Image (cartoon, coloured by chain):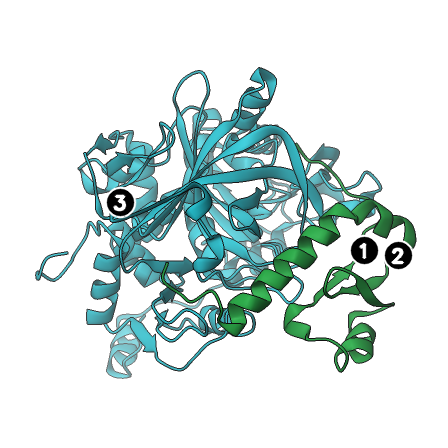
Amino acid sequence: MSSPGDHPYRKSLYRILENRAWLDAHIEALMAQYKSKWIAIYRKEVVASADSPDELRGICQDKVDMDETIIFQVPGAVRTPI
Amino acid sequence: MTNEVPRFPFRSLRDWIVFLEQNDQLRRNKKEVNLRYDLGYISKVTADTGGPALIHENIYGYPDWKIFCDGLTTFQRKAWALGLPLETLAASLAGVIQSGNLIKPVLVDTGPCKEVKIFGDNIDLTNIPIPYTGKYDNPPYITAGISTIMDLDTGWHNIAIRRFQLKGKQRLCDLIVSYQHEGKIFAKYVRAGKPMPIAIVIGADPLFYLLSQMPAEDNVSEWDYWGAFTGEPLQVVKCETNELLVPAQAEIVIEGFVDPLKREFEGPFSEFPGYYSGCYYLPVVDVRAVTMRKDAIYYYLYMGKEPSEGHSMAHLMYSAQILKQLKQLVPEVRDVNVLSTWSFTTAVTVDRRAKREGLIKKLAMAAKAIQAGALIKNLLVFDDNVDIRSLSDIIWSFSVKFQPARDFLAIPNTIGAELDPSEPSLGHGPGVSSFGVFDCTEAGPPYDEPFRREVALPPKSDKALEVLRDLGLNG
């Protein structure tokens, strides 16, 4: 476990984890607002939404670092299987 | 590892790597690969083309690590891993599985998986190179992590590869499904209000990996079969923070506890049916310790649309366990071959001389009743003179023996697989499916002309065989 934590890949992974934690904490509100839409989450906020992932990428790829961005389709409901 | 050339039984991933390399079945990739973009597609193509096992030695951001993958994508390599002849692999495997010569693991004091020990807040799972697979998996998943858990009442150990999404430096989400052993065991911890200890093994010998893909019977630990194949017990060590046992030769072991009540949003993931799974609220693994070798090798499994190493392992091992468990209820069963998707579609043969009214229905009910048959959705039944490892034989028999109006049985509202993308279209959501039985066995009389019941093949003459031999062709 000696990989440097300040490597660009590792930094982007930490950002992804932060974005994911934000997504997890706000999923109910996101489902109410963006159900079935594709959203881009960058630096803990929704920076764009669209009807398809390609459209979404087109909107945000020049504005944000895509390696730190979560592209996600908001579900209508979430199951708890166990 | 000694200087001797490793041979079966392979006791570690390293023995297996040396063996594969010496048999020209392993390639080392020294070009830089990015965990986010590169590994999934390379493995997909490798599986598609029957390519070699791979070690990636130049990982962007992880200069000290190597990643191994695709070791068990071919029948030859699976045969080597099991110590069985390729020519009779299915029959030989079935023989070992049905032998009952199980040997429990032996506890040893320590092993290479204890060379490095990290505890508590010092753990950072992002220090391990976990590749992305699908483009919407975010953060990435551990895909070759063998979950090891123990029954609360009996101490029965269960092992199985599960998907673990990285959620934090010391946190993973664990897809636990209620009808599988992991779900049944976890339910006991939930009822008792106790956290479930878990150990996730990443990187082990190839037989251990194959066994982790085998749905053994209730209360049977898959690793007891390790001794059935090798004649000796698997060496295991105790975890640092719980009572679980793990292979002493493992590369990486992640120890933790699954809270009985805590659930966290998870998904999507490029799952084995070949589509992205939906999102779930899933149990959470709080990681308490990581132990590993000093120069640990990460094991990666591509997951998604088949073929893949995971499918390759599962189809072989599911076939053998379904056969074993089915024969106990229906002795007329002769052979089983999983055709697709972790047994969603499975072919079975029955003794054609022992056929009787109602046998196929009995077989169908048994297939859904056994532990190993939980995922079967389409059951294709053939006579035992059909080679169910030959797709052309299967399609031919289906074409000329199966009558849709007579030979198809559909049972609605059965327990589903959760991850089958066709389930929601039934209107009950994921987890509810249906079950279809395709009776492709030879129908009985009346026949219009008796000679038409003989399979139309040309005569096989000595001269024809001689000519074929001269041409270098098998007759």
Q: Chain of mark 3?
A: B
Quarter in which the C terminus of chain B is drawn: bottom left
Q: Residue at x 15, y 56 (%)?
A: B1
Instruction: Tell me the element at label 1.
Output: loop
Where is residue B323 shown, x and y percent of the image?
A: 44, 38
Task: Give the CA separation, mark 3 to mark 1.
Answer: 42 Å
Task: Give the CA separation, mark 3 to mark 2.
Answer: 47 Å
Palette colour of chain A: green
The residue carrying mark 2 is A34
Inspect this view and state whether residue B305 appears: no
Instruction: Tell me the element at label 2.
Output: helix
The residue carrying mark 1 is A74
The residue carrying mark 3 is B114
Q: Residue at x 71, y 33 (%)?
A: B414
Palette colour of chain B: cyan
Q: Chain of mark 2?
A: A
Where is residue B79 shown, x and y percent of the image?
A: 29, 55
Q: Identity of the amino acid at label 3? A: Lys
Q: Residues within 10 Å of mark 3 (few under 14, many from 20)?
A: many
Q: Identity of the amino acid at label 1? A: Val
Are the residues at dot 2 and dot 1 in contact (C-beta closer than 8 Å)? yes
Q: Residue at x 83, y 75 (%)?
A: A55
Q: How many marks do you count on the picture? A: 3
Q: Which tag is nearer the camera, tag 3 or tag 1? A: 3
Q: Identity of the amino acid at label 2? A: Tyr
Q: Residue at x 51, y 59 (%)?
A: B393
Dividing the picture into quarters, in which one does residue A42 lie?
bottom right
Q: Residues within 10 Å of mark 1 (few under 14, many from 20)?
A: many
